[in-house]
Amino acid sequence: MNLIQQNDLTEPAAGKRQIVRHTADALRRRILAAPAGEQIGSLQTLARELEVGIVTVQQAARILEHEGLLEVRRGPGGGYYGRRPQMADLERMLGAYLCGEPGSWREILDITSLLFNRLCAAAARCDDQALHGQLLDLRSQIDACDSMDGLGQLEGRLQDILFKMVSQPLFELLTRVALGSARDVERDGTGADMFDLSIWRHGRLRIIDAIADHDPALAHFEADRQNRQVLATLCAFDRL
């Protein structure tokens, strides 16, 4: 048994988690200081350079894998390679946090409303004609929507187009997580009885028209008005 392996067996259990966190921090700094896809070292090399045991490095690596920052390649040419987390990785982590700290339906609506209002206003400042064309094409599909079938797909496409028009990664991440939490609540049945297809359709059409007219103030107003309609319905629903 070599010295590195002995370190893993002799470290006090009480301090082990702290050592793993420090090791993860050190690996994270190495990854972010190097180009994406670059090898930051092998298991043995990293354990020696960081002066910790190989099990500690493996545990720290699992943390970074979950964060989407690390790829472990095995076999010839293997090792630890840095990467950059994708939007899906970040959504998953924040979504998991929200599951552990569940908020009320009303709180989720409040957060989603604020972010969606800003999203619509920002989209109205976009000058990309191709994206405006996609938005107007989607408008026709929403206008023709007369049933719940496919509604989720239309709403998802609307959000995707708006995110492209805004192109602000952090804003997109926070909005997607909030909207995803709202959809999770809807799938659980909470607030389902208060949903009105007609309100959704006409509200979305007014929002799209304001964005197409490059009017941020009106887009924000229309988004806020539709959100207030939902909140008013929720208040009535609570009184039943």
Image: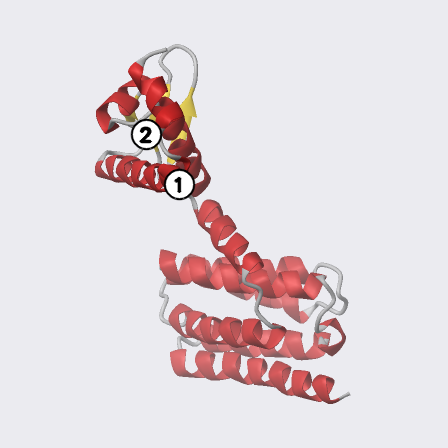
- Give the quadrant of the N terminus: top left
Above or below, comparing residue 160 to residue 202 in the picture: above
Dot 1: within a 10 Å radius of its alpha carbon, few (fewer than 14), some, or many (20 or more) residues?
A: few
Q: Amino acid at mark 1?
A: Ala
As shown in the figure, which amino acid type bears the numbered disc 2? Gly
Please, what secondary structure does the residue beneath circle 2 have?
loop
CA–CA distance in space, label 1 to label 2: 35 Å
In the rendered view, would you say 231 is above or below 159? Answer: below
Whether residue 39 is visible, yes or no, is yes
Quadrant of residue 216 in the image? Answer: bottom left
User: What residue sits right under mark 1 in the picture?
Assistant: 14
Residue 147 percent coordinates (x, y) = 77, 67
Circle 1 — which element?
Answer: helix
| Foreground tag (1 vs 2) | 1
Choose top left, top right, bottom left or bottom right for residue 121.
bottom left
- Describe residue 231's horizontal placement relative to residue 122 as left or right: right
What percent of the width, then of the height, locates residue 42?
A: 32, 19
Q: Which residue is depicted at the point 53% across and 66% down?
A: 136
Question: Front-most of 134 and 103?
Answer: 103
Instruction: Identify the mark at residue 37; answer none if there is no mark.
Output: 2
- Label 1 close to label 2 by CB (< 8 Å): no
Residue at figure coordinates x 65%, y 75% from the top left:
200
Give the percent coordinates (x, y) of residue 10. 36, 26
Quarter that holds the C terminus: bottom right
**In front here: 210 or 113?**
113
Query: Sequence order check: which comes first, mark 1 or mark 2?
Result: 1
Q: Which mark is residue 218?
A: none
**Compared with residue 31, is residue 204 higher up or lower down, i.e. above or below?**
below
Instruction: State the residue at coordinates (44%, 83%).
Output: 218
Picture layout, residue 226 above or below residue 177:
below
Residue drawn at (58%, 67%), measured in percent from left and top? 139
Report x, y in % for residue 125. Answer: 36, 71
